[in-house]
Amino acid sequence: MHLTKISLEAPYLLFLGDCPDMHHAKTGAGIAFWRPERCVGQMRLPACPVDLGLPEMTVSDAQGAGVRTAVIGVAPMGGRIPDVWLPLLSQLAAAGINIAAGLHTKLNDIPALVDAASKGGATLTDVRIPPPDIAIGKGRLRSGKRVLMVGTDCAVGKKYSALALHRELQRRDIKTTFRATGQTGIMIAGEGLPIDAVVADFISGAAEALSPDNDADHWDVIEGQGSLLNPSYSGVSLGLLHGSQPDAIVLCHDAERLEIDETGGDYPIPELDEVIDDALRMARRTRPTCFCAGVSINTSKMGDFERDNYLSKMQSDLGLPCVDPIATGMTPIANFLLKYAS
Amino acid sequence: MHLTKISLEAPYLLFLGDCPDMHHAKTGAGIAFWRPERCVGQMRLPACPVDLGLPEMTVSDAQGAGVRTAVIGVAPMGGRIPDVWLPLLSQLAAAGINIAAGLHTKLNDIPALVDAASKGGATLTDVRIPPPDIAIGKGRLRSGKRVLMVGTDCAVGKKYSALALHRELQRRDIKTTFRATGQTGIMIAGEGLPIDAVVADFISGAAEALSPDNDADHWDVIEGQGSLLNPSYSGVSLGLLHGSQPDAIVLCHDAERLEIDETGGDYPIPELDEVIDDALRMARRTRPTCFCAGVSINTSKMGDFERDNYLSKMQSDLGLPCVDPIATGMTPIANFLLKYAS
């Protein structure tokens, strides 16, 4: 089985539409952060408050700057493309600029856009299309080592944590592959498997295919999806956890997140030790030796002093390495992971 | 949103293909058991050992008996239609007999079958097609009461337990609806939502749509799918559990099942109290008051004496009503459910 491999022509324009806040612009922000050398501008509807710090561009600016691909950098709830984006996207396509997106709505299913792309000679790339021949999960233990990011919620830093841990393992000359499970990760890595877009019966089978048998000393660093605690997406998270059969998990959290997003306050996030306990209890159904290698927390709203205190206290409470994947780095988690993985 | 509503013309011929054992013939067996008045015959390939106790029929027998629909009664692993079934299915369709199936492979995607049906004037009905407009799960508490079947594995009696409990509640003149989540249940009920066929991100949203707001004293009896313990299908089970937000669960088990099916012995089934504990721990994330109303066990291989001893011991160990849904009936579970549901 082949993973979804994509190839997008740089330079990129990051399209933000009417994105209401940074939280929903995680695709654009992720590409800008992990692939800055490819991004030359951003495009927004007038009311959009999100700013990725890139030059603001009109369609003709983008043409002038030689933009080859407009990447939709917003992940609206439910993954559908709002009608208000279509005039701008059509203008881009008609101007010969390729468009790439990873939403549930397919660019290639929108007739106006297909027409415009055809006129402009542009391509429309839908990243969130799973391969057609995924098998049912088997639960068979595979060779090689795996570490999976597990979240307290969506959009808390699972992808950043995985990419940072992957980079840290690479730095140590350890054989390692970042395994993307979502649209942004796939756009960053150039391949992966959009696990939340497969048919429900095949979630764990897709996770098994994403990290196949490998060298005994090779580490797959697997991007997580959703959260076992999230009432919208928990099925995806459990299928990914069971199919990954990870040697270890890393719990990812956002220090500002007090409750599950988009659920109107009915879902407070429990204490992190309880979240870890739940995740390990489930993980050990397919991987009895699974352990937690640390907690990776987005503390980007904190100053250095506050962050140090927060992470120290958390580390002392949990007895596990606690880091911010960007501000303090993944070294302690990589050390713990490599020390305790059998 | 409309549920998948189907309407199949009786009388039925139950098609068993090359089904290797009764366990994989659960669709045919379920229809024969719950809708015996509609079933007039069975059809098998020569080597098939499964017998539903219906008259054996050839294509011309079926024509002579006035069969209107051949229902595929086998659920092969992965839900795909084997090529060896196609000659017989094509002959049936060419003879004007409608065909209905609930597998992942669509009858309407098989050109030879579509041709034959077109020539014979037969219809091909694919039951396992989810509605197109499912929303993402919201996690909002809905009015009305719900009880969900939760299994130790696939094919342990969740559908039978739900149908038997539904019948018991009807007998007491309690407002109740059986909510089908799989192909056989949908074929029996005439409507439902094939939860394992939706896109992974929408599992809990589909479960929410399946049991919408209702009268405060109305009970949805929801058919379960898979098992939290099953490495192939656990994601479906968790999404269904979270989206159902059940007031109560009923644990369903097969007394003969010592390990998760099709996993080569790597997955023994834990003690039932541990299974209940896991399920309630997950269930209470979206429904904090969820409780277990009893254990419904397929003991069809036991004699009466052995069954009574087994169920008595289980009941005493677990402190919950333990029944066989067919042999002893759901009365104790219905009593417990109605007594403790607030």
Image (cartoon, coloured by chain):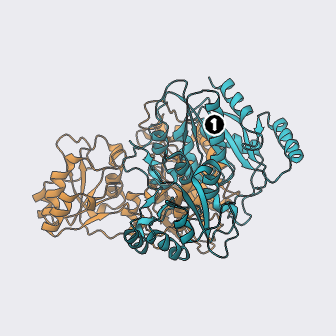
Chain colours: A orange, B cyan
Give x and y (percent) for residue B239.
53, 46
Q: Quadrant of residue B233?
A: bottom right
Q: Residues within 10 Å of mark 1 (few under 14, many from 20)?
A: some
Is residue A318 visible from the viewing direction of this image? no
Q: Residue at x 17, y 57 (%)?
A: A112
Q: Nearer the viewer, residue A319 or A14?
A: A14
As drawn, is B228 to the left or to the right of A117? right
Quadrant location of the C terminus of chain A? bottom right
> Where residue A163 sits: x, y (%)?
46, 59
Provide the chain ID for the residue under circle 1: B
> Looking at the picture, which amino acid does disc 1 mark?
Arg
Query: Which of A229/B2 is in front?
Result: B2
- Where is residue B38? Give x, y as percent: 57, 52
Q: Which residue does the numbered mark 1 point to in the structure image?
A: B167
The image quadrant of residue A11 is bottom left
Confirm whether residue B340 shows in the render: yes
In the rendered image, residue B101, in percent from the top left (x then y), is placed at 50, 60
Query: Would residue B321 be found to the left or right of residue A255 on screen?
Result: right
Q: Is residue A21 above or below residue B194?
A: above
Count up the numbered dots.
Answer: 1
Q: Nearer the viewer, residue A30 or A336?
A: A30
Q: Is residue B247 above or below residue A272?
A: above
Q: Is residue A190 above or below residue A107?
A: below
Q: Residue at x 11, y 63 (%)?
A: A64
Residue for point 68% across, 35% down = B292
Please give the name of the residue rendered at 78% of the width and 55% of the height, measured from the top-left corner. B256
Q: Classify mark 1: helix, strand or loop.
A: helix
- Determine which quarter of the picture holds residue A276: top right
